Structure formats: C-alpha cells, structure tokens
Image (tube, rainbow, N blue to C red):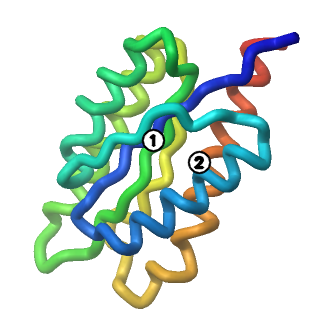
Amino acid sequence: MKDQLRIGLVIGSFHKEACETMRDAAKAEATRLGLEVNEERWVPGSMEKPLAVKRMLAKPTIDAVVTLGIIERGETGHGRTMGHAVIQALIQLQLAADKPVGVGILGPDILPEQIPARLVPYAQDAVRAVQVMLSQKAG
C-alpha cells in the first residue's frame, strides 16, 4: 500500500484570526483528499514564508507545502512589491526542491471587505493544487 502523502502548512500570523480560518479549511481539504498535514509553522508575515517553506521542503517527511496568508492593500505600494517578491521566491523554491508549493495568499492589494469570502476557497484551492501536482509526479 502506498504511503500517505504528507504536506506542511506555512501560515502568516499577521492576520491571525483570518489565517486560523484558512488553516482549518486547508486541513479539512487535505483530509478530504487523503493528504496528511504533518507540520504547521506560523511566521510573522509573508516575507518570512519563503525561508520557512525552504526549511520545510528540505525535510524528507514533507512532500509539499501550502502557504496561507493575507497581503492587504496598504497606503503605499509596499504590499504589491512584497507580494511579487514572495511569489517569485516560492516559485523558485518549488522548482529547486522539485516539490509543490501551493499558494493560498490573498492579495496583494486585497481590501478588508474582500477578505472573508475568500479565506476558505483560497486555502482549499492551494491544497488542491499541491494534490494535483503530487499525483502527477506519482503517475
């Protein structure tokens, strides 16, 4: 029998309550898809996600990582710049490790009123994305 695929979650704590909703949705979706969430790391914000993801991807006990968080629209373009840098880093990490990284990061530039309706779907979609990529590698 094939071993269960194991994923890790890297979650930003800047919007803690909203990200707890995302975490719970991601874990439920992982269970529904037959994935085991065997590690969870909270980091201060999105800029810290790539390092946490890199460390997690290096572990043989992790087959994929899902990142969750929010980059809300601010008064300057900082969030947009940061969002692009974080996504680029996550893409490079998954290519280097040959392990999928699912991105469930709302924004950049998301408005506060847009956040609640997107928490669960973005988290679920990020888990589904890694499940698809894991199944393609196995096949």
The answer to whether the residues at label 1 and label 2 have Cβ atoms under 8 Å apart is: no
Q: Position of residue 84 (x, y in %)?
A: 30, 47
Q: Position of residue 91 (x, y in %)?
A: 42, 30
Does 103 appear above or below 58?
below
Local crowd at mark 2 within 10 Å, few (<14), some, or many (≥20)? many
**Tag 1: amino acid:** Leu
Secondary structure found at label 2: helix
Image height check: is 52 above or below 69?
A: above
Q: Which residue is mark 2?
A: 126
Q: Is residue 119 left or right of residue 79?
A: right
Quick one: quadrant of the C terminus?
A: top right
Q: Secondary structure at mark 1?
A: strand
User: What number is the disc on residue 83?
Assistant: none
Q: In the rendered structure, which amino acid carries the disc numbered 2?
A: Ala
| Label 1 or label 2, whichever comes before in sequence order | 1
What residue lies at 35% left-to-right and 85% top-to-bottom? Answer: 112
Residue drawn at the location 72% of the way across and 45% of the way down: 31
Q: Is residue 92 above or below residue 114?
A: above
Residue with the mark numbered 1? 9
Q: Quadrant of residue 86?
A: top left
Q: Tell me where residue 127 appears, x and y as whole percent.
A: 63, 45
Q: Is residue 88 above or below residue 104?
A: above
The answer to which of 34 and 111 lies nearer the viewer is 34
Q: Position of residue 10 (x, y in %)?
A: 38, 42
Q: Is residue 24 left or right of residue 28?
A: left
